[in-house]
Image (tube, helix red, strand yellow):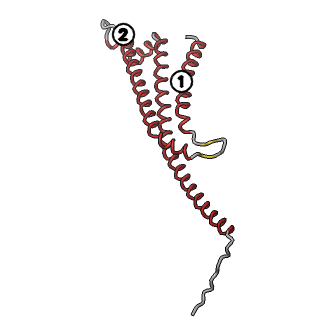
Amino acid sequence: MCIRDRYVRSVYYDNKYVEFVQDQIQKYHRYSQLINYNAGEINPEAINTALAQYNDILLMLISEYNRLKADAHDVEVEYQIWWDDKFTSMRRQLNPPDIVASKWLSKSEIESETRAQYSKEYREWQDKLFQAQQKKAFLGQLLDSWKKMDSILITISTNLRAEMRSLSLDNRLMYKKEELASSSTPIRREKIIKK
């Protein structure tokens, strides 16, 4: 295989992986968008929606992660079956039963010869294994990140409630001051006499 073919294949697999990553990020990005950048604030409805949807998204991520984990396992099993078949046939070819066992090639020599003989297929299997492992690892990181989102949402929600309570108290105090200032009746003050 020439260098150009390897480059084309690696770009192809890299593009498929990049597309996968971008799709996953776009899918879950909208659920984590809480800030209204035009107003520079976090909308209380956005927090409530995010809290309400958090568990559904977590379950989707868990199921998708487990699906990719199963896919990666299937690829590994298929590869191992392919490898065992090729290795066994190569061992029979290189170590025929009619020669003395002391003259047989070692396992590492047989593995090297098998990889050389089936280099194209071996490379394709390694690419498949790598892609499956990378997808699983990426979704695992996305899942871990989403689990951290739980504490972020709760903190933001708690801060928002405290701020709203504070604003409500400030509004009530302002209303009382305005009411007192606009009142036309004088405030009656009584003198307290001590006996």
- In the displayed structure, does residue 188 sit left or right of residue 125? right
- Quarter residue 59 falls in: top left
- The furthest residue to the top: 98
- In the displayed structure, does residue 157 sit left or right of residue 177? left
Q: Position of residue 176 (x, y in %)?
A: 62, 66
Write down the residue under mark 1. 17
Quadrant location of the N terminus in the rendered image: top right
**Mark 1 or mark 2, earlier in chain:** 1
Mark 1 burial class by Cα count in 10 Å: few <14, some 14-19, many 20+: some
In this picture, is 68 found above or below 147? above
User: Element type at marker 2?
Assistant: helix
In this picture, is 125 found above or below 189? above
Mark 2: which amino acid?
A: Ser
Q: Position of residue 91 (x, y in %)?
A: 36, 11
Write down the residue under mark 2. 89
**Camera-nearest residue between 165 and 100:** 165
**Camera-nearest residue between 97 and 178:** 178
